Image: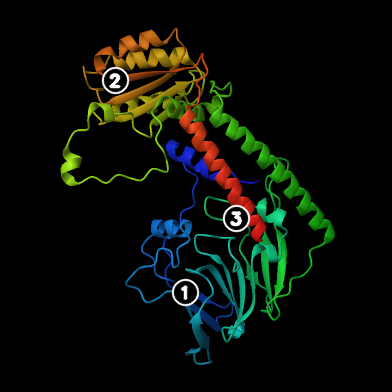
Amino acid sequence: MKYVLALIGLILVSTADVARADSWALPEKEVYLASDGSARLTLTPRELTNQLDFFEGKIESSGLAGQYPASAVKSPMAVLETRDATGAWTAIWQGKLVNDVAPVNVLVAPSGRYFVTLDNWHLMGYGDDVVVIYRSDGSVVRKMALTDFLTRSHVRAMPRSVSSLQWREEASLSPDGTMLVIPVNLPSTRQSPDPAPVLYRFALETGAIDAIDPAMQATIDELARISLAEDEAAEQAWFAFITQPLVKPTDPGQLYEYLVEAYRRLTPFRDPDAEFLFLSDEEAELPPPDSAIQPPETPWTFVLEPPASKDYGRSLQSLNELLKESEGELEDAVAIGSADEANLAQVLQAYAKRLKPGVYKNVYLFVAVSDELWPAIVQSFALSGAKLTQIDTGDAIPQSPEWIAYFQKRKEQAEAEQEAGEAAE
């Protein structure tokens, strides 16, 4: 069940504006040299419009996702060359690679006898061509998915980013150019957060894989079992967090997440799957009706350190800068909290004294404090025009029925997709 809630997590993280996503530049023409300089492979990737078009096309399962319409290059193309004693290059093969857009890495054996492609651009670890071994004439020795040499539980427990499996470190060829060596990452657990990779060796001539030591395989299986169990428990806890009533955490390190989720619950529901509405220039210039005005989807979120913290001075300065930047901004939103609510209230009241009347009329200010501190904050910001909302730290904040229904729908969809994928393996 690993990462069943990945999509839900991305939606939540995107609201916090701190998505842990991987960044992929568009692939470009590359030249890969053999270690002794006797051969090289020049790769020309399939030409794309942009990353977003590619990603959306993959979601829709469209052929040639993100293809640049005017480009005649509809597959990654390669030219394999060897160099003679005079330094002149001679092409010995040119043609298509089996990848969709481009491989992530290419290794070339001396004299170009073999070459190897590793992974797919933007989708490391996915597909039946994660490892492809070619002969010098472009014929395929062997094409492999991860499950061709790793157990399914190992793959499911593999570290990953938004788009890719972080399944390996830098691969290499043996000094004699006969073997492919890939350091494969092991499942990480709380007890073993960073285990050393295990070397997998592939014969270039046949594609055969050296057997892994049984004791090491047993270790891998146990790490995968623990990792998957930890992930399932974490996913259940996360689903409970986003659906159950929200209370202020006792751990100050969780305050940022608390503020983000509180803001979500205290603002109108926005369907993440809704289509964007594009307005004409004339429509865009018209002011929206009062009924359509609502807080921005994403707030600036800030946690003020307590006065006893060594970072308090810097934290206080950053908060003042954030509040200053919001003055006069159009439809800005700020959510603020602190482990020391009394000090936060004093800081905000002191800052409010500097504000000119009406300067915050476009600002939605959400403050996480208890009931006894709230009235003084309301009074301090009364002339500023700020649209104030209390995040009541003394009471639980329920999740909206719309969000609960949405999260449940996406959870069921993710589980169904995972089951379908496992059935197809």
- Can residue 121 be seen from the camera position used here? yes
Q: Which residue is mark 3?
A: 166
Residue 28 vertical placement versus 10 (above, below): below
Q: Secondary structure at mark 1?
A: loop
Q: Amino acid at mark 1?
A: Pro
**Label 1 close to label 3 by CB (< 8 Å):** no
Q: Return the x and y of residue 124 as percentages of the image width and height.
A: 56, 60
Q: Which mark is on residue 111?
A: none
Relative to 194, 9 lies left or right: left
Mark 1 Cα within 10 Å, few/some/many (few <14, many 20+)?
many
Residue 370 vertical placement versus 407 (above, below): above
Q: Amino acid at mark 2?
A: Ala
Q: Return the x and y of residue 330 as percentages of the image width and height.
A: 25, 31
Cα gap from disc 2 to disc 1, whole angstroms: 55 Å
Which residue is at the front of the view, 379 or 396? Answer: 396
Q: Which mark is on residue 386?
A: 2
Rendered residue at 81%/54% (across/down): 218
Q: Return the x and y of residue 24 as percentages of the image width and height.
A: 45, 58
Q: Secondary structure at mark 3?
A: loop
Rendered residue at 51%/30% (across/down): 257
Dot 1 or dot 3: first in sequence order is 1
Mark 2 Cα within 10 Å, few/some/many (few <14, many 20+)?
many
Mark 3 Cα within 10 Å, few/some/many (few <14, many 20+)?
some
Q: Which residue is mark 1?
A: 76
Q: Amino acid at mark 3?
A: Gln
Relative to 367, 247 lies left or right: right
Dot 2 or dot 1: first in sequence order is 1
Which residue is at the front of the view, 138 or 349? Answer: 138
